């Protein structure tokens, strides 16, 4: 017997079909090319050869991986900076759209940056320990955000991950693993502080965002978690690529036992064999990062399904949660929604919120994927999940290439066309008679014709089968869950530029946040400071408090920087009642911008 390998330049289903037809021809199961049948118009039933029956939804063969949820990331960095300054009721409305169950995005996971005083994309976030003998668990806004998320959804999972570290961690080096025990104690202190001061239970902890991991540090971190009774806290590694962490785990038993979840960033919906070989939980622990227009929404719809279909990833977390930073900073509007004008109260519920809802409102962490999931014959994909109690949720997407490009990685070309898809329900689902239907369709950006998260009439199941006519750039949710809702509030105020006149005297007792409103620190950390030895207005200042260069994640500037206002404007007048820049103090200020920018 001679073995042969066959290749085809055709991609996907068409390529597999070509090879199948060729194999049948070689085996004599199709008439040869000179057979009379070809003369009289014989054509093999191409689609039926590839998929003779409807797509089957069945739990009898067993279930797939446990679903861990859909989430958003605040930080990496300072991406929620302006959110805290929103007046009520608008701030609460934004939070409801993100976290409230059965209302909007209804997220299952909130991942936050563990502030380290360094620039981490759109700004700096303060550390809870600027110095070795300093502990303050009220700096920044991530504590507040986690509490607001928990207030709306007590079951939401919390994840912490460092981007930068305060300089003392490295003992003079720009490296957090010089003293693994010191770094581990620093991170564990953040977890303990979250519980002691805010009653927050952190569920997962990471290593170092998109930077090299250190096996010894990971092992030390696990041991110290155990020492402090934090056995339930799971370690995610390495928040970068699938390799070399997967290979290292396969060759280091102690490392394998220390890590609970392998988290990769922007995996392009695919994993690698080594990661699968670990038998660990796989996450896309940072993904999306795309401008939140219709194309961004299409990107999010495609990867939410295909991260599992192609890559067995049971959770996907979007960078970022909400675009609440000055849009002229890097990656403007790369959030699930946009809230960048606290001075006006204006915000926008963008399409990714409603794309999230197609999954999050109808499947919860702990549900399991069916094994019978996959790609549609004419493009697109479908996943199905169950709670094991008879409930079923199916999410179908038919995103086209041009309507679903994410910012990274490059997306190989593929085709999607209109199609009719039938799904046969078997096993625990064979007695179902109707399914609730939620629908979205992306239209042209210019025409603004998109339909987002619209409830359609229930779909009748006939002889155990449901049939849908699918167009392109559509998302369907078919479900037994009846609690779905497209939440809404009155239209927020109209967009307004930053005020042409702005004043802040920093005279505030017991400020709710350590930073002054609308300042966005880019290098260093500025905090309210009251000088009790001064009298009058000079007693109240905004002070830069970092005196040692942090272990950087990005290219921090040599001098400290905080920005405020409209990027497009040039100030006509800037008054600092007393400017002591050598001490890095901002005293009460007044800024005058041109009337037109």
Image (cartoon, rainbow, N blue to C red):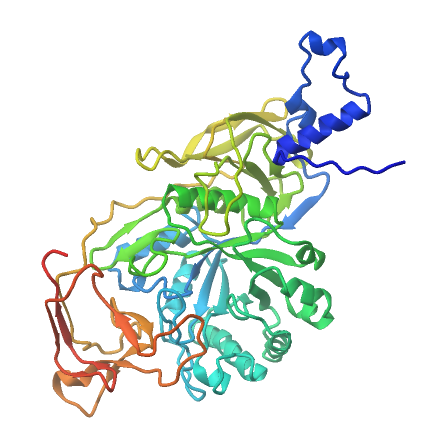
Q: From what the image shows, is residue 117 above or below residue 16? A: below
Q: Position of residue 139 (x, y in %)?
A: 36, 75
Which quadrant does the N terminus fall into? top right
- What residue is rendered at 72% in x and 38% in y? 60
Give the left or right position of residue 571, taking residue 263 as reference: left
Can residue 388 be seen here? The reply is: no
Give the left or right position of residue 573, taking residue 258 as reference: left
Give the left or right position of residue 370, taking residue 2 as reference: left
Which quadrant does the C terminus fall into? bottom left
- What residue is rendered at 53% in x and 77% in y? 188
- What residue is rendered at 48% in x and 37% in y? 399
Foreground: 39 or 566?
39
- What residue is rendered at 12% in x and 80% in y? 577
Q: From what the image shows, is residue 201 above or below residue 31? A: below
Q: Position of residue 452 (x, y in %)?
A: 39, 37
Q: From what the image shows, is residue 54 above or below residue 94? A: above
Q: Residue furthest bottom?
A: 533
Q: Residue furthest right?
A: 1
Foreground: 323 or 431?
323
Q: Position of residue 570 (x, y in %)?
A: 15, 64
Q: Position of residue 479 (x, y in %)?
A: 53, 36
């Amino acid at each position: 017997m001679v073995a042969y390998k066959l290749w085809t330049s055709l991609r996907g289903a068409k390529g597999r079909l070509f090879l199948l037809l060729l194999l049948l021809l070689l085996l004599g199961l199709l008439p040869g090319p000179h057979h009379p049948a070809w003369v009289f118009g014989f054509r093999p039933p191409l689609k039926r050869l590839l998929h003779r029956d409807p797509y089957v939804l069945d739990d009898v063969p067993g279930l797939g991986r446990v679903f861990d949820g859909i989430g958003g990331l605040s930080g990496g960095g300072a991406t929620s900076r302006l959110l805290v300054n929103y007046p009520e009721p608008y701030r609460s409305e934004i939070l409801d759209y993100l976290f409230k169950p059965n209302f909007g995005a209804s997220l299952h996971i909130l991942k936050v940056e563990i502030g380290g005083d360094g620039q981490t994309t759109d700004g700096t976030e303060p550390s809870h320990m600027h110095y070795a003998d300093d502990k303050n668990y009220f700096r920044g806004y991530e504590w507040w955000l986690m509490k607001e998320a928990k207030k709306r959804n007590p079951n939401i999972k919390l994840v912490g991950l460092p981007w930068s570290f305060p300089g003392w961690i490295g003992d003079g080096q720009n490296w957090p693993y010089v003293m693994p025990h010191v770094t581990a104690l620093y991170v564990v202190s953040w977890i303990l502080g979250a519980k002691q001061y805010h009653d927050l239970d952190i569920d997962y902890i990471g290593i170092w965002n998109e930077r090299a991991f250190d096996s010894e540090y990971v092992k030390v971190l696990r041991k110290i978690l155990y020492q402090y009774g934090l056995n339930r806290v799971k370690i995610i590694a390495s928040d970068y690529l699938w390799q070399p962490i997967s290979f290292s785990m396969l060759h280091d038993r102690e490392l394998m036992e220390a890590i609970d979840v392998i988290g990769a960033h922007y995996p392009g919906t695919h994993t690698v064999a080594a990661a699968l070989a670990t038998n660990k939980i796989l996450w896309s622990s940072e993904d999306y990062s795309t401008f939140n227009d219709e194309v961004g929404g299409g990107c999010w719809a495609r990867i939410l399904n295909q991260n599992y279909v192609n890559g067995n990833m049971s959770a996907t977390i979007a960078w970022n949660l909400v675009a609440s930073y000055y849009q002229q900073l890097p990656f403007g509007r790369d959030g699930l929604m946009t809230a960048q004008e606290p001075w006006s109260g204006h915000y926008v519920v963008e399409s990714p919120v409603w794309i999230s809802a197609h999954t999050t409102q109808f499947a919860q962490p702990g549900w399991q994927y069916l094994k019978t999931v996959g790609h549609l014959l004419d493009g697109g994909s479908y996943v199905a999940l169950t709670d094991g109690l008879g409930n079923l949720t199916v999410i179908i997407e038919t995103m086209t290439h041009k309507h679903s490009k994410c910012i990274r990685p490059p997306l190989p070309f593929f085709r999607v066309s209109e199609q009719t898809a039938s799904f046969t329900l078997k096993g625990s689902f064979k007695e179902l008679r109707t399914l609730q239907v939620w629908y979205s369709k992306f239209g042209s950006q210019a025409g603004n014709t998109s339909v987002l998260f619209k409830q359609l009439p229930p779909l009748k199941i006939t002889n155990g089968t449901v049939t849908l006519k699918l167009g392109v750039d559509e998302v369907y949710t078919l479900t037994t869950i009846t609690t779905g809702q497209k939440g809404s509030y009155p239209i927020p105020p109209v967009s307004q530029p930053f005020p042409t006149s702005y004043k802040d005297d920093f005279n505030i007792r017991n400020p709710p946040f350590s930073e002054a409103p609308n300042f966005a620190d880019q290098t260093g950390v500025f905090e309210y400071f009251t000088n009790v030895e001064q009298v009058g207005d000079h007693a109240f200042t905004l002070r830069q408090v970092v005196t040692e260069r942090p272990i950087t994640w990005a290219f921090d500037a040599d001098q400290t920087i905080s920005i405020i206002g409209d990027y497009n404007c040039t100030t006509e007048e800037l008054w600092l009642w007393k400017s002591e820049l050598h001490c890095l103090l901002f005293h009460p200020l007044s800024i005058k911008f041109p009337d037109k920018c």
